[in-house]
Each structure stands twice: as C-alpha cells, then as structure tokens.
Image: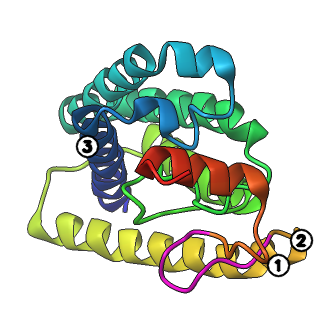
Amino acid sequence: MSEGLRWTLILVFALALLEKISVLGAGTAAWHPMIVLSERRRRHATSLMAAASASDAATIMLLLIWAPVGALASASLIAVYSTLALGMRNRAEGCRCFWKVLDATSLPTLLVRNLALSAMSAAILFTPTALWTIGSIGAGLGMFGVLVAGTALADRIFRPLAGYPPTLRGTGRVSPELGDEVSMQTAGKASGTW
C-alpha cells in the first residue's frame, strides 16, 4: 500500500511542478492565487515560484529514490503550502495548486485535501517500502482518483457552507453579480481585462 501512496504523491507533486512551470513560462507568477495574497509575495513572485518549483522537483526525486526522506520532504512542503494558503478566504478561482486537478476553492477544502496528503506522507514514512511493481503504480493511480473525487466532493460541501460565492459553471470564476471583488480584480488583471 505504501508504494501506491508513494506513486500518488509523485503524481501530485508532478502536477504541482507543472502548474508552477506553466505560471513561470507565462510570466504570471505575481497573479497566482497563493502569491496574490500578500504584497511581499508579489514583489518576489518569480523567485518564490522558482524556489517552489525546485522544492517540488526535489521532493519528486526523493520520493523516487529514498521514500522515507521523500515522505518527510512531502509532509514539510504540504505544511508550508498550507500555512501560506491560510490567507485564502474567498478565492473563487481556487488555489491552482495542482494544475487545477486537485483545485480547492475554499480554505476548508484546501485544509482537508492537504490533511489527506499529509496522512499519505506519514503512511509512507511509517511503513516499509517494497519494490516498484505495475500493481503499485496502478494502486497509486487509483488512490489519486479517490483523492481527486474526495477533493471535488469536499469543495462542493465546504464552499456553500463557508458562504463563498457561486462560480460560473466550468470556469472557476465568480459571477459579477454574485462574486467577490478581490477575485474578480485578480482574474481581470491576470487576463488584462480589468
């Protein structure tokens, strides 16, 4: 089982790395939802995004090569990213943490998802690792599917309970009539329409 969890975390951090690389490539690091939360982060957006990319890549390598150390790195990054996201209160566009595959549009969803990722890291840390097999890769993909479905379900439950505005179907953006001003400004500035 720990090998399946290992593959799940490798896939999660690969998606996180792809998100950061695409943001860096587009030159929009200052408008990433986790960066826009703080003026200080925005001033150093590219450097922060590059450092986070390097950290994600190192975690992937450690999970591949030395699972217990990779699990510690994974848990550490998840804790840091969760702490940085605490300012995310009413973010209609979501966190965009994992290339929108595991998107969390409310703080409770983000915390539940990250708690599940931390539990996976702990399970890897405290269980013996086995050789990689096709079965473990398949188990990892299956667990990833459960994680995606669980995150989507948590978002559907927590977003309305937290009083967050409804989003335009399929876009992740808020409706101008129903939305919050900060998210609309952020989305508009990032796209050049605000």
Q: CA distance from mark 3 to mark 2?
A: 31 Å
Report crowding for label 1: few under 14, some 14 to 19, many 20 or more residues within 10 A (C-alpha): few
- The residue sitting at 47% across, 28% down in the picture is 72
Mark positioned earlier in the residue sequence (3 or 2) = 3
- Which residue was labeled with disc 1? 160
Element on which disc 1 rests = helix
Spot occupied by residue 152 in the image (x, y as percentages of width and height): 57, 77
Answer whether labels 1 and 2 touch (C-beta < 8 Å).
yes
Q: Is residue 14 above or below residue 153?
A: above
- The residue sitting at 62% across, 33% down in the picture is 79
Q: CA distance from mark 1 to mark 3?
A: 30 Å
Magenta stretch: helix, strand or loop mostly: loop
For the magenta stretch, what is the residue range?
165-173
Element on which disc 3 rests = helix
- Which residue was labeled with disc 3? 22
The numbered mark at residue 105 is none
The numbered mark at residue 163 is 2
Mark positioned earlier in the residue sequence (1 or 3) = 3
Element on which disc 2 rests = loop
Task: Specify the amino acid type for callout 2.
Answer: Gly
